[in-house]
Amino acid sequence: MKLVILLMILSAMGQDNSNSIFDCKNAKSTANWYVVNDGVMGGLSEGSLVLNDSGNILYHGYVTTANNGGFSSIRHEFNTKDVSDFKEVILRVRGDGKTYQFRIKSDASQRYSYIKSFKTSGSWETIRLPLDSFYPSFRGNTLDKPNYSGEVMKEVALLIGNKRKEHFSLEISKIYLE
């Protein structure tokens, strides 16, 4: 019993329960973000991210369906975050009018993601995504599993993969929970 209590305490100590996922105001770099393009499957899409002059993340590039490609993504891994007190993930972004996916993983070793799509307007906007609306998917296929439980979060990602050739640009100021 003492071991179980000790493990629970150690687990809770390693978890973050703040509402911030990423805030560019506090960011000095994009070191905790990385790009995953369709080159992992032979595709030719190119996405990149930089901290721009405004201090925001600029995620931009080109998606092509050539060579069985068709997506670009950026991922941000962090200490396990207790999100059980929150109902929504909120994005402060300026997009290009295109549709993107926001993705959540509960565990770093989890192969699938919980996904919710959103469309950008071309202007600065606040996108609100209910946590219970994220559905499980792996390589474009919906899985026969329950939607996101909203308990813990270990990684978030943004992905564009609209099944067509296109340039894209998404500026990100803040990602947080309410």
Image (cartoon, rainbow, N blue to C red):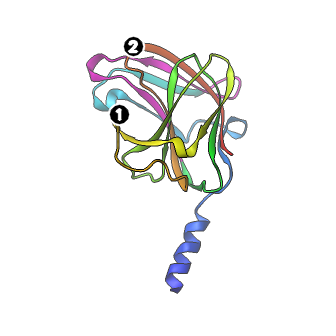
Residue 15 lies left or right of residue 106; in this view the side is: right
Vertical side of 81 occupied by 64: above or below: above
Q: Are marks 2 and 1 in contact (CB under 8 Å)?
A: no
Within-10-Å neighbours for mark 1: few <14, some 14–19, many 20+: few
Q: Which one is earlier in the sequence, the residue at label 2 or at label 1? A: 1
Residue 91 lies left or right of residue 161; in this view the side is: right
Question: Disc 2 on helix, strand or loop?
Answer: loop
Mark seen at residue 171:
none
Q: Amino acid at mark 1?
A: Gly
Vertical side of 176 occupied by 101: above or below: above
Mark seen at residue 165:
2
Who is closer to the viewer here, 178 or 154? 178
The magenta stretch spans residue 53: yes
The residue labelled by disc 1 is 140
Residue 62 seen anywhere in this rendered image of the structure: yes
Q: Position of residue 170 (x, y in %)?
A: 57, 23
Residue 76 seen anywhere in this rendered image of the structure: no
Q: Quadrant of residue 84?
A: bottom right
Who is closer to the viewer here, 22 or 147? 147
Q: Amino acid at mark 2?
A: Lys
Within-10-Å neighbours for mark 2: few <14, some 14–19, many 20+: some
Q: Report the span colored magenta.
A: 51-77
Q: Position of residue 157 (x, y in %)?
A: 50, 37
Q: Position of residue 48 (x, y in %)?
A: 49, 25
Vertical side of 29 occupied by 123: above or below: above
Q: Residue at x 27, y 26 (%)?
A: 42
